[in-house]
Amino acid sequence: MRRDLIAQQLEIALRTSLPVPALRLIELKGERPAIDETREPWIPIKYGPASPDDWFGVVPATARFERDRGGAIETLDLVVKVNPRQGLARTLIPWIIEHKKIALDRPYWEYRSAAESDHTSAREERLYGLAASTPALRAVLPRCYGSGTDLRTGEHALFLEFLAEVALDRGRPADALADWNRGAFESKTVGDALRNLKVAAPIESKDIVIRAPDIAENGAVVPIEVQSNVPGTKSLAVLIEKNPFPYAASFDLSQGALPFVALRVKMGETSNVRVVVAGADGKFYTAAKEVKVTIGGCGG
């Protein structure tokens, strides 16, 4: 996306988000990622051809502006994130398939599993639109100053708060963040994993919603979404019952956090995806959904 167009649309966005109706952008400085086609030949495939003045991907930038003409000059550090017009399902993944000489019976984007990586250009913009009316979501996202679109190319740009440091969990010391439940991850049965997680007698619950494909065409990348409606959800754990090591992931939720997670897991064969939730009442709740796998993803 052209830098001059980004600057024009950033000025409009800042006038609305700061809000300063008379704001004038003086300068937008930043340097896009360098292109090394020998080391990263997929870059032009993913983002398309780029002129020297085009920005793509994630570009740290600094905006210099004045609130009123002739006023003091202020600076704002931000990130300009430019998403390509086409999703990976139509660019990078077909390129990988071609270079790996993988035989398909139709273009990759016609497969059901391609849907999650197709038409992705405007998804982040919609996410920030949703955050405007969802306080729990807004609390965990960097501030968005607005967005811009190149109508000629279909590219979308987001103007995001620059975060130099991110605290993963302000309630725990830094060394605790490195802790992990080795016993749970190395457990070879669901029962052993739950014992290592100190989960006792989970209760079947319809308040846990698991969204996953009924049939996964590729077990190496199976998208899963979990929404917990259990009151005061404190944590979520995801287990793939028939995997060699069933425990896949867990999430501790701070007070007020939205009890929703999205992840991708590997599945070696058809299996139940089981979710265990810890509620505010000290009890554990569980639900499961079967996912049929046509090509396993846990091979060597």
Image (cartoon, helix red, strand yellow):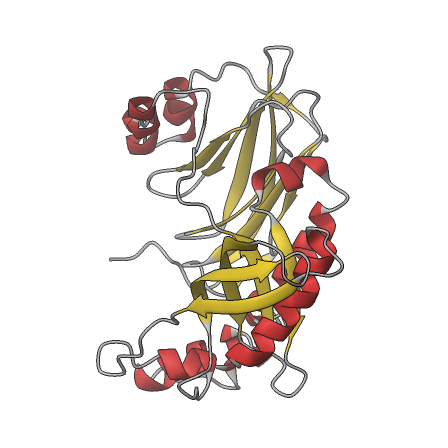
Report the front residue among 132 and 8: 8
Residue at left offset 65%, top offset 26%: 256
The C terminus sits in image quarter: bottom left
Q: Is residue 228 above or below residue 133?
A: above
Residue 70 seen in render:
yes
Q: Is residue 282 above or below residue 31?
A: above
**Quadrant of the rendered structure where residue 258 is?**
top right
Residue at left offset 38%, top offset 58%: 297
Q: Is residue 245 above or below residue 27?
A: above
For residue 52, side relative to residue 2 (left or right): left
| x, y percent for residue 189 | 37, 31
Report the front residue among 74 and 99: 74
| x, y percent for residue 104 | 45, 83
| x, y percent for residue 19 | 73, 51
For residue 240, side relative to residue 100 (left or right): right
| x, y percent for residue 177 | 34, 28
Residue at left offset 43%, top offset 65%: 59
